[in-house]
Image: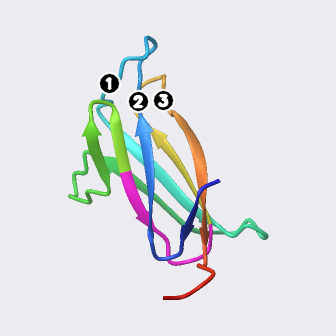
Amino acid sequence: MARVPVNKPARVTASFKDESGNKYDPSIVKLRVGLVVPRSGQRLYEATYIYPAGDGDGTIVKDSTGDYHADITMTEVGWLQYQWEGDNVLDPIGWDQIDIVNPPFSA
C-alpha cells in the first residue's frame, strides 16, 4: 500500500480499456473517495468527483484517451479508499487505498 503524508496530495490514476484492451473515454468518469480510520473503521470523509465537471470542480484530469488522474489531499490520518467508475458495463475498474500518515519528522 502506498503511503502519503497528511496534507500532501495523493495521486490516484485510472485507465479505461475495452474488451480488446484499447483505451477509451467513458462519457462520464466518477471517482469515489473516502477516508477511513484504520482501527475503528469509522468513515471520516466521503466524496464523489465527476468528469466532465458541470460545476467546474476540475478534480479529475484527463491525461490522454482513457487515462485520468486526480490529486486528493487529506487533512486527517487514515486510509484513503478510492474507486473509479464509468458509464460502461466494463466499469468500475476497481478500487484501492492509500495510507495517509503523519510524517516521522517535521520540516
Q: Percent x, y for residue 96?
A: 59, 47
Q: Pointer 3: what residue?
A: 91
Mark 3 or 1: in front is: 1
Specify whether 29 is left or right of 52: right
How did the renderer colour the structure? rainbow
Residue 42 vs residue 60, the one in the foreground: 60
| Image: 37 above or below 1 | below
The amino acid type of the residue labelled 3 equals Asp
Q: Earlier in the sequence, mark 3 or mark 1?
A: 1
Q: Is residue 66 toward the left or the right of residue 104 in the image? A: left
The residue carrying mark 1 is 24
Pointer 2 residue: 16
Query: Can you say whether 26 is above or below 35 in the image?
Result: above
Q: Quadrant of residue 20?
A: top left
| Magenta segment | 70-78
User: How many residues crowd around disc 3 within 10 Å: few (fewer than 14), some, or many (20 or more)?
Assistant: some
| Residue 8 position in % (x across, y down) | 45, 72
Q: Are marks 2 and 1 in contact (CB under 8 Å)?
A: yes
The circle on residue 4 is: none
